[in-house]
Image: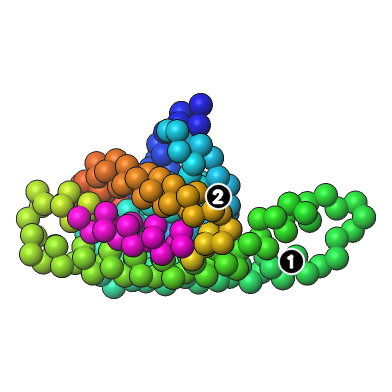
């Protein structure tokens, strides 16, 4: 059943990011970046069994942040993609600081969410630090690699090479850095390796499935079907 839910979540994420882009253009992608990184940092605290292996949630929506920066790099500029990454950094830091400040408040006798919030957000500083490190390294690599491939293979038919070639290596860097930084000492090494493998494999699947959507995004941009202002 988890596999069915995972496929449904994959489809919904793609539909949402493309809706944001169609309605608001690059601003829609700037909106999607903080949504993706904040939700991913909450979902990643939950581990599930997928395809016979143990994995963390958050892989799908986090992987779509790479689709967003690739669309920005393809249809706009490397500068726009870097701006999106900076927005992602700011959103992660803001959520971590504000949610941990919220935990300092003494709950009322009628409160029933404090323990749940502690379970999720007390771990957040480490996860956020790991995310910032992995996010920064992998996204900067993705933008650089995408730009490099675009300069050397500029023809329109090589869009799939730019999209997947840059993202697959970047996702490997991201998975390795995040898994070790966030979960070393939390899970046994065997579970850590399993999470690393499944995390990367699932991100690869998302990357391969997002290829038609970056083609669609370019088509919308070229045919001026994108609303570039609110």
Left or right: where does residue 157 sit relative to residue 216? left
Position of the C terminus by quadrant: bottom left
Q: Residue at x 33, y 62 (%)?
A: 173
Q: Is residue 179 magenta?
A: yes
- Is the residue marked by circle 1 packed among few (<14), some (14-19), or many (20+) residues within 10 Å? some
- Could you say where residue 12 lies in the image, as x and y percent from the top left? 44, 38
Note whether 78 is above or below 179 in the view shown. below
Task: Measure the C-alpha gap from mark 1 to mark 2.
Answer: 19 Å
Q: Quadrant of residue 88?
A: bottom left
* Magenta region, main secondary structure: helix
- Could you say where residue 201 lies in the image, as x and y percent from the top left? 34, 45
Note whether 66 is above or below 17 in the view shown. below
User: Mark number for residue 74?
Assistant: none
Q: Residue at x 41, y 64 (%)?
A: 177
Residue 165 visible in the displayed image: yes
Q: Is residue 173 magenta?
A: yes
User: Mark number for residue 102?
Assistant: 1
Tell me which label, 1 or 2, sits earlier in the chain: 2
Residues in magenta, as a range: 165-180
Q: Residue at x 55, y 71 (%)?
A: 93
Q: CB under 8 Å between callouts 1 and 2?
A: no
Note whether 55 is above or below 180 in the view shown. above
Of residue 143 and residue 45, the one placed in the foreground of this image is 45
Residue 12 visible in the displayed image: no
Q: Secondary structure at mark 1?
A: helix
């Amino acid at each position: 059943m988890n596999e069915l839910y995972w496929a449904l979540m994959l489809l919904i994420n793609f539909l949402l990011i493309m809706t944001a882009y169609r309605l608001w253009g690059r601003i829609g992608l700037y909106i999607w970046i903080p949504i993706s990184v904040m939700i991913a940092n909450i979902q990643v605290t939950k581990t599930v069994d997928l395809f016979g292996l143990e994995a963390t949630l958050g892989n799908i929506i986090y992987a779509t942040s790479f689709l967003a920066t690739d669309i920005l790099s393809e249809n706009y500029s490397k500068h726009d993609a870097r701006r999106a990454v900076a927005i992602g950094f700011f959103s992660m830091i803001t959520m971590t600081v504000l949610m941990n400040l919220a935990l300092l408040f003494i709950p009322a006798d009628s409160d029933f969410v404090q323990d749940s919030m502690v379970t999720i957000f007390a771990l957040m500083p480490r996860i956020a630090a790991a995310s910032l490190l992995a996010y920064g390294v992998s996204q900067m690599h993705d933008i650089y690699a995408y730009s490099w491939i675009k300069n050397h293979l500029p023809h329109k038919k090589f869009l799939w090479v730019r999209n997947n070639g840059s993202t697959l290596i970047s996702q490997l860097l991201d998975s390795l850095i995040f898994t070790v930084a966030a979960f070393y000492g939390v899970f046994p090494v065997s579970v850590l390796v399993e999470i690393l493998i499944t995390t990367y494999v699932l991100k690869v699947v998302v990357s391969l499935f997002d290829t038609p959507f970056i083609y669609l995004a370019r088509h919308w941009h070229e045919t001026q079907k994108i609303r570039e202002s609110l």
